[in-house]
Image (cartoon, rainbow, N blue to C red):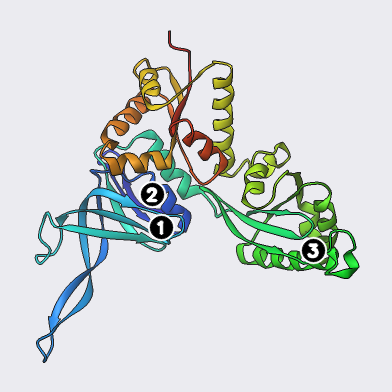
Amino acid sequence: MQIIYKNVKEGDFKLKVTSLDDLWHLSQTIDEGDIVSGTTLRKIKVSGESEKAASNKRPVHLSIVVERIEFSKYSDNLRVLGTVTLGPEDVPKGSHHTIEIESGTTFTIHKDKWLKYQLDRIDEAVNEKPSKSMIIVLERDSAGFALLKHYGYDFLGEITGDVEKKEYEKKQPQKEFYSLAADELLSYVKRYEIENLIIASPAFWKEDFLKVLSKKDQKLAKSAILATCNDTGKNGVDEVLKRPEVKSVMAKERASKEIELVEKMLYEISKDGLASYGYSEVKKAAELKAIKTLLVLDNFLMESRQSGNYKEVDELMRAIDLSGGEIVIVSSEHEGGIKLKGLGGIAALLRYKPA
């Protein structure tokens, strides 16, 4: 993300989206009641000789008061929906419109007050480089590939081979399958400019694969980190994210930080320590200014917006922000987010245990 202009005192940021990861950050930054300004396409009607109206679209610059946002990691845009406050004469004030934000879009956000965690989110997006880390999870006859993202990971796909479990020579030899898997991996490495590779598997399959990979790309194989997992596919990737031997690679990835915080919170809960979970309990802790770190699931925020309860949640986060607490938006796309969802989507690490 690129900052074109900012005036925090006045509440204005002009931003340019430079990657799809930026959309994730913005989906957690833009709130109901903000004013978003940008260029969008407006449908107009023109009449031809047959007098039949045909639809056409032209670009217009609008400002809208945000009512809701729509974002999915499977889409390449962020939809901001609201009512028009400023636009050309043929666009009535108060009418509903949508501004679509995608990679390359330049737009402006105005907030009455920016919270610290929101400013931190913008700074993080500005200083963040595209992830260059990848995981391959494999066994004897299957290999799954995952590209680590700042909001979780993208599972790129899985390939399987026809390897005989006992007598390899009767079907596709294991080395031949691993050669195909290595070629598939290297195509992803080239496409995404991968610098960090984690090879994970149950048993000794990772070592066997590494030998094959080293013949194709010795430099990559030499720098790869091996990890053990008990499962394959997406479950295996979730497991690998928590492995201690990959912390050196994952330290720079947002997903690792979020999972670590959730695990720390679960540990505190297990020993009846400095943790609170569920909205009502977290609210009580916030009223006592006892919250050190708030963990809130992205889907929790989305659902609160859809149900009309976001104002109350926003006031809670503002109170925690003003008391010096850290606010971390946890992605629902990884195991940490799934565990947080099981606790109601909101939890907190505490400074002290309320009486």
Residue drawn 35% across and 42% down? 303
**Rendered location of residue 266, percent (x, y):** 56, 26
Residue drawn 28% across and 49% down? 68
Label 1 – label 3 distance at C-alpha? 39 Å
Q: Which amino acid type corresponds to the residue marked 3 in the rendered image? A: Tyr
**Rendered location of residue 324, percent (x, y):** 40, 24
Q: Which amino acid type corresponds to the residue marked 1 in the rendered image? A: Val
Q: In this view, does 125 lie to the left or right of 134?
A: left
Cβ–Cβ under 8 Å for marks 1 and 2: yes
Quarter of the figure with the N terminus: bottom left
Neighbor class of circle 1 (other Cα within 10 Å; few <14, some 14-19, many 20+) is: many
Q: Mark 1 points at which residue?
A: 17
Q: Which amino acid type corresponds to the residue marked 2 in the rendered image? A: Leu
**Rendered location of residue 163, percent (x, y):** 81, 64
Residue lying at the far bottom of the rendered structure: 49
Q: Name the residue under label 3.
A: 178
Neighbor class of circle 3 (other Cα within 10 Å; few <14, some 14-19, many 20+) is: many
The quadrant holding residue 158 is bottom right
